[in-house]
Each structure stands twice: as C-alpha cells, then as structure tokens.
Amino acid sequence: MSCNLNCPCCDRGYLRLLRDCYFAPSRDEEYLSAEYRTAALMAMLLLWYMPSIRLLARTYDRQEIRNALLFRMTPYHLDRALEVFARQHELKSVPQLAEMIFATLLYDDVMTEIQYEHDEGGGA
C-alpha cells in the first residue's frame, strides 16, 4: 500500500531534500539576503504542509503539491520565484511567496514568455 506522500518518512525525506539541495551552504549566495533565505525556507515548509492550494481556477490537493515538490521542482524554480517575487513585492508575506513558488513550478514557461514579451515587446 502506498503512503500517498503523507507519512513521517516522506516528511523526513523532504526536510533532507531542503537541507541538501535548496538550502545547502553552497547555495547561500543565491539568496538576496538572509531574510529572503529564511522566507524561502518557511514558504517551502508551508507548501509541504498545505492541505490544498488554488491557482488559476484549479485546486491542487496535498498529494499533488507534494508530488510536484518532490518530483518536478528544482533549485531553478525556487530561484526564479524569488527573483519574480523580489521585483513585485516587499518581503512581508510567506504565504504569497509560497504561492509564487508553486506557480513558478507549474507555469514557469508561461511566466517566462510573458516576462519576455513585457521586457522586449514594450508591454506594460
């Protein structure tokens, strides 16, 4: 029987992944500041424990969120989300940052295209 990514073993594995991949000391220079690093960690933990998240008229349940975090996400997605977030928001809301991270994970190609059109095409 499958644990549906909802067991203590999965929790420990995710925490190890955060420590060894996203928040390893070798990546410290990737963060704008210690505050952004801490906020990113808090947002990643928040995502892991969220019962659901709603983006673009679709609700993702906990298993879908965890599956995406474990099997689709890379440090690039986190870095990209922090880059976009830093341009658009003051660092005050960890839940908003968590939403941006998940949106970047799912829709980064679309976000990149929109940003390119904005930067190169003179969009507003």
Image: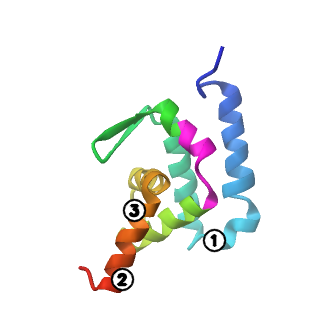
> Residue at (73%, 44%) from the top-left corner?
16
Which kind of residue does numbered mark 3 sit on?
Val
> In this rendering, is residue 77 above or below 88?
above
Q: Which residue bears the numbered disc 2? A: 119
Which kind of residue does numbered mark 2 sit on?
Asp
For the residues marked 3 and 1, what is the alpha-carbon distance in whole angstroms?
23 Å
For the residues marked 2 and 1, what is the alpha-carbon distance in whole angstroms?
23 Å
Q: Badge 1: few (under 14), some or many (20 or more) residues near its Cα, within 10 Å?
A: some
Q: Residue furthest left?
A: 124
Task: Say which element carries label 3.
Answer: helix
Which residue is nearer to you in this view: 95 or 92? 95
Q: In the image, residue 122 lies at what x, y percent?
A: 28, 86
Q: Earlier in the sequence, mark 3 or mark 1?
A: 1
State how many labels appear: 3
Which kind of residue does numbered mark 1 sit on?
Glu
Q: Which residue bears the numbered disc 3? A: 110
Seen in the image, is 50 located left or right of residue 122?
A: right
Q: Which residue bears the numbered disc 1? A: 30
Range shown magenta = 66-75
> Residue at (50%, 43%) from the top-left corner?
46
Residue 87 colored in magenta in the image: no
> In this rendering, is residue 73 above or below 112?
above
Q: Are marks 3 and 1 in contact (CB under 8 Å)?
A: no
Residue 118: mark: none
Task: Say which element carries label 2.
Answer: helix
